[in-house]
Image (cartoon, rainbow, N blue to C red):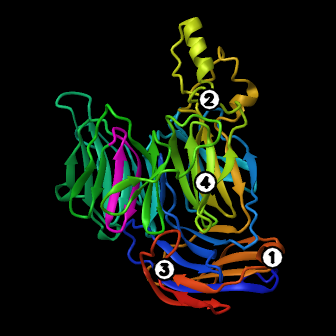
Amino acid sequence: MPNSSFGEAVLEVSVEVDLGRDIGQRFGSLFEIRDRQGRVVAGAGFADVYNTRYRVGRDTLQFFVRPKNDDGRFTLERLPRPTDECGVYLFDLDGKVYAWGSGRERVIGSWDESARRWEGGHSDKMRSGDGKMRVGEGILEFDERGARYNDRMILSPAKEGIYHHFYYANGHLIFFQDQSSHEPKFGKLYACPWTADSGQPVDLAQAAVTPLTYPRETPFAFGQLGPTVLTCSNNGGVYAFDGRAWRTLRPANNQVSYQIYSMVNYYDRLLMAHYPSGVLYEFDGQDIKPLDGWPPVLAGVSRSAREAQTTMIYRGDLFVGVWPWAELWRRDRDEDRWISMGRLFTHPPLTDKVQHPYEQEVRELNAAQGANIVINQWGQRVASMIPLADALILSTSAKWPCAREPRLTCLTDAVYEEYGQVIRLRMPGNLAATIQPKAGPTRLTFAVATDGMAIQQDGKLLATTRLDAKLTADIQPASITWAHGVFGPLQGKLVSKSVRPACGADAP
């Protein structure tokens, strides 16, 4: 066991993996272990998730254990608020979590666990869809000024209109263009070949470009399945790029609501979080179809105008956050059922008489005082999900951050306080750490003791957490599947692998 302060070893898995040249690809699963009944009891891999505004760090490695006598217990801890706005979105980079306020379009600060507060922040403008990500040993940054790698310009600002909502995957820098300020108005979607080790800027002449139906089409999510990159605009246009050309899977139509707010790889599928059905859709590489009842509707609320907004893999399970009642759902694949984890808000009481929280109060105020408040403005979002150490970090938001409306007497201090919160959810048995970039193979070691678990990279301890001895007492590994699991198939090569105690190997 890497940490000598832990007790007797229960399980140790070691893999030497070559993740290959970093071209923005998703990495996937390293292994998954099952007991004699076929239940998943442990696994490790990299979640690839894009939630509404940000892609979660691809280099965050999760290791989980799920003992047989799991009772599904969890805790919620409300962290200090990073802002007085009524909404906050989170992103991560190199193992740190940052808060972003859309009302001010800036980074508010990063979470300092030791000080238990949000530190720093800056005044630079940061639009939705702007961001930073690690690629190889450098940082790729993109915003209204274009794109830069390690502060070297690789894409200049658009000569017409603006570039926005960037995504780097499979060796292509993907982004939208909006020229709606003057005639002729147009929108385009680009996929430009580029790699960090080329030393060259993006060459627009080599781009695969598809025209958009509407100049201001805007995505809320991107995803990958094998060689295909998928995105969906706010007008319902679904576009797939296969490495050579774009294909329209669904034409944009601004008369019909169809929006995708999150994408996540889950086993061999790419799942897409849909509005207004509130369920997940799946993409198999060719077609898209809805998954009815994924997740269910919380008892006591309207079945209309629902939005599955956020997704994540945590402790080996799929998590989904749903608007407008900030529902949190977890799927247990082994038991083939969805488990409600409640709401992230305590107010108002559930009702199916209206679609959104406080909708009736807003309608009454608008009628009585001639106000023009959007009726679903005080709907409730699970805006972010980020794995950090042993926890899943969540955030909440109204429809969009706005000033408090003093004429709405229902928005008491206690009610308003729940908008724009950051919440730490913990379920025992998950550990996340950021791996260090490395050219060629790297050795990753995962260990479980009677009272803790740990992750190592090339002999260096990355993370540890304590576990209750009762949690690990009944972990009985019977079979192991290499390079496949809940995070999707591995995109890389396992050079060597071992597991103790020994157990049989299954085909994916």
Q: Secondary structure at mark 4?
A: strand
Q: Earlier in the sequence, mark 4 or mark 1?
A: 4
Q: CA distance from mark 3 to mark 2?
A: 44 Å
Mark 4–mark 1 contact, CB under 8 Å?
A: no
- The three-letter code of the residue at mark 4 reads Val
Spot occupied by residue 374 in the image (x, y as percentages of width and height): 51, 22
- The three-letter code of the residue at mark 2 reads Pro
Q: Which residues are magenta?
A: 218-236
Quadrant in which residue 191 is drawn = bottom left
Q: Earlier in the sequence, mark 1 or mark 2?
A: 2
Question: Does any portion of residue 1 appear in the rendered image?
Answer: no
Left or right placement of residue 74 versus residue 283 in this view: right
Q: Earlier in the sequence, mark 1 or mark 3?
A: 1
The residue positioned 35% from the left and 51% from the top of the image is 231
Q: Closer to us: mark 2 or mark 4?
A: 2
List the residue tagged with mark 3: 483
- The three-letter code of the residue at mark 3 reads Ala
Q: Earlier in the sequence, mark 4 or mark 3?
A: 4
List the residue tagged with mark 2: 357
The residue positioned 35% from the left and 67% from the top of the image is 196
Magenta stretch containing residue 224, yes or no?
yes
- Does the magenta stretch mainly form a helix, a strand or a loop? strand
